[in-house]
Image (spheres, grey):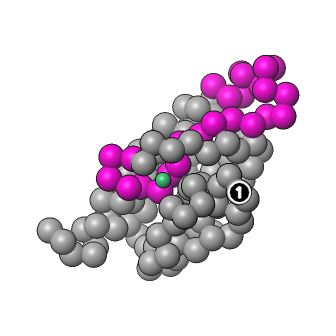
Amino acid sequence: MNEPGDRYARQARNEALMREVNERIAELGESAQAWSPDGVVEFLCECGVEGGCGERIRMPLHVYETVRAQDDRFAVRPGHETPELERAIDWTDEYVIVDKVDAAEPIVADDPRGAPSK
Ligand SMILES: [Zn+2]
């Protein structure tokens, strides 16, 4: 079970799981904006490492929304990218937004909101 495809499929499943958690966090964040005036919310890193890396990323809710607007985009901690699967399209000291390379898209689960990948 050490085929690269298996590893990537497992990673994609873990990423999808982190994404589900972050969707809940985003929902909470919307109602929490009253005490978070800058709109920054703590999300979980979506790097898809086995069991989740558990690291947090602080990201403004509106930036998170731009990540979720495409179903092949994820937000991870700097250094948590997987170069074989994704390329960075935007980054700060706090987070990197990655876009899945075409070869990886078939194994990435559909976005919970059903957003298009292009
Ligand atoms: Zn991570």
* Frontmost residue, 79 versus 3: 79
Closest to the observer, 110 or 39: 39
Picture quadrant of residue 69: bottom right
Residue at 58% from the left image edge and 32% from the top image edge = 25
**Front one among 111 and 33:** 33
| Horizontal side, residue 5 vs residue 59: left or right | left
For badge 1, the amino acid type reads Asp
Task: Estimate the x, y position of residue 11 in percent, counting from the top left.
Answer: 36, 60
Q: Residues within 10 Å of mark 1 (few under 14, many from 20)?
A: few
Can residue 8 be seen?
Answer: yes
Tally of numbered tags: 1
Residue 41: within the magenta? yes
Per the rendered image, the range of residues in magenta is 28-52
Find residue 109 and report its horizontal and vertical position in percent. 42, 57
Placement of the C terminus among the 4 image quadrants:
bottom right
Picture layout, residue 21 above or below residue 100: above
| Residue at 52% in and 72% down | 86
Query: Residue 67 placed where, x, y %?
Result: 66, 54
Q: Is residue 88 above or below residue 52?
A: below
Residue visible at 38% across and 66% down in the picture? 107
Q: Residue at x 42, y 48 (%)?
A: 53
Is 96 inside the magenta-drawn segment?
no
Q: Residue beneath label 1, please? A: 93
**Residue 22: x and y, percent?**
55, 39
46 sits left or right of 73 in the view:
left
Q: Residue furthest left?
A: 1
Secondary structure type for disc 1: loop
Looking at the rendering, in which quadrant would you find the N terminus? bottom left
